Amino acid sequence: MPVTLLRCLFALLILFASAPAQDEAAKLDAVKEFTKYVKKTKDEPLLVEAVLTLKGQECVAAAEELFKMLKHPSALVQQAALGVLETYTSEATYAPWLTDLQKNKDHDLVATVIKVVGRARLKSAVPAIEAAANEPKANVVVKYEAARALRSIGDAGSTPLLGNLIVDKEAQVRMAALDAVAALRAKAHAEAVTKALDDPEWQVQSAAVKAAAVVRPQSAVQPLIDLMKKTGRLQEDCADALFRITALDFGLDPERWQTQWNNLMSIPGWRIPTDEELKKKEEGRKKYDALYGKKQVPTKAFAGIPTTSTNVLFIIDVSGSMDDLVVEVEKFQEYKDRKRFTIVQKMLLDAIDGLDANTNFDILSFATDTKPWKGRLVPANVVNKDAAKGWARGLKPIGGTEDQYTALSGLGGSANLEAGKTNTLKALLYAFGIDPDNPPKAVVTGFDKEAIKRPLDTVYFLSDGRPSVGKLIDTAEILKEVTKHNEVYRMVIHTIAIGDFQKEFLQQLASQNGGVFVDLGR
């Protein structure tokens, strides 16, 4: 072999051998520069940008710095750090934290580590997660994050951890475990799912109903029928779960379900359909919806979206653009004028009229700021309904046509146009009892001990405009924020659009939160 060729091959070998070392050195240098930068920088946007520079720099040193940033008081900085850690997927990166995780007495750190490796979908971390969550002294947040991590990783583990968490004394833990069972299709926990249908907390019952629809235990049919006999939003979820277990469809009629179920139980050898048989039934369900339970439409509805809920919040956009005229005149001929708000106001008044005495409700108007009618759910009795309609009749768009004319005449201060913008985030977070202008202390874990205490379970959100003011105006970021909170609160969010606003945001908001989207038109 020629000497020149040997030299070339030798040089390549040296290059390849040194590449990993050079790469590691570059990563360590990036971490070093990051550490120096964050020590002298307090500006939140710059800190977020700095955190993002560690993406692609996976190593133990980078992970150490990111774990430190998870304790930062800024929620945005925390989320940025968590987002970068999510991209670190090497077992070696997390080895210092996973070793003897169950012996670590810092419960907050343990919960954070579990959340991080869960978000990173690190399958090799499952044994450490199980060991930590199975510890007798494991606290509620550790167990909560363990259930969520197993769900994200897609592994139910080799110990009966999920089964234990389904019967945990803390409702949020039970709920997270049931969500994991549903996501993992863990049929081994079918009986525990059935028992959870009788849980004292409606949010846990909701998770159990969803899990029953997936793992499909025959033992869940009677408890689902019993639960459907009670008033409330879960009636609709129960009807869907019963269909997915039995492949039968009797809608929201619990008495008919009961009669048919009694008949089936009298047939020797009857069994629930297989998954394959159910799939065929699902394919034909839409075709036959009109012939089955869809006839039992609840009388309560807003913008054509019905609900069986007994705890409802109406959120109505009163920003300046709601004073604009609709374009599709033929759709709105029965209204006194063509203003968007006139149409919405009439629909709201009709919805209030349709509320029954078993329902509790409130109304929130919003533009730049929010304005609740009562600030709490009240019974839909004759007195409260009359008062609510009076309040709704007094609503009008802020910064509408008249205010714009005032501004053009040089009286901009009295026009108050700044108050007529669209603060979508603030309106949506009101449903969770959160004010983004005065947020609670930022925490990395998703555990919220107050969530179970809120009875509100259904929101109707109507808007015509793109978010234009507030802590977040990017629709993708707003969706993330709502989803983060609603994982625990479990509210259904229906959305209604009117006007020329791009509808994808409201469509996604409804679909990601179990709701229905309606486009009233332009």
Image (spheres, rainbow, N blue to C red):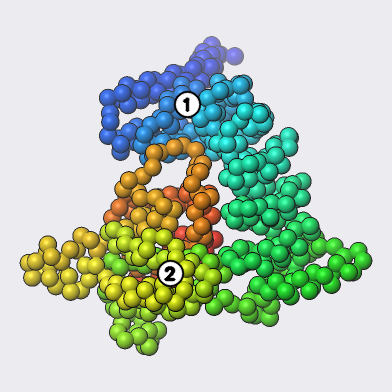
Element type at marker 1?
A: helix
Density class for disc 2 (Cα within 10 Å; few <14, some 14-19, many ≥20) is many
In this view, the mark in front (1 or 2): 2
Residue carrying label 2: 496
Is residue 132 or residue 222 the one in the foreground?
222
Circle 1: residue type: Ala
Q: Residue at x 76, y 65 (%)?
A: 246
| Residue 23: image location, x then y, percent | 46, 22
Q: Is residue 365 visible?
A: yes
Q: Mark 1 points at which residue?
A: 63
Sequence-first disc among 1 and 2: 1
Relative to 110, 329 lies left or right:
left
Residue 290 horizontal/vertical position (percent): 65, 80
Distance from the alpha carbon under mark 1 to that under mark 2 = 43 Å
Identify which residue, 289 or 376, lies in the foreground. Answer: 376
Corner quadrant of residue 78: top left
> How many badges with numbers are in the image?
2
Locate residue 28, reporting x and y percent.
42, 20
In this view, the residue in front, 65 or 201, is 201
For the C terminus, which image quadrant? bottom left
Q: Quadrant of residue 105?
A: top right
Q: Considering only vertical position in the picture, is 222 above or below 89?
A: below
Q: Residue furthest right?
A: 268
| Residue 12 in view (yes/no) | no
Give the quarter of the figure containing the N terminus. Answer: top right
Residue in view at x 29 percent, y 72 percent:
395
Q: Is residue 276 left or right of residue 321?
A: right
Residue 395 sits above or below residue 101 on the image: below
| Residue type, label 2 | Ile
Residue 504 image-quadrant placement? bottom left
Determine which of the numbered discs, if any, sits on residue 112 in the image: none
Q: What element carries label 2?
A: strand
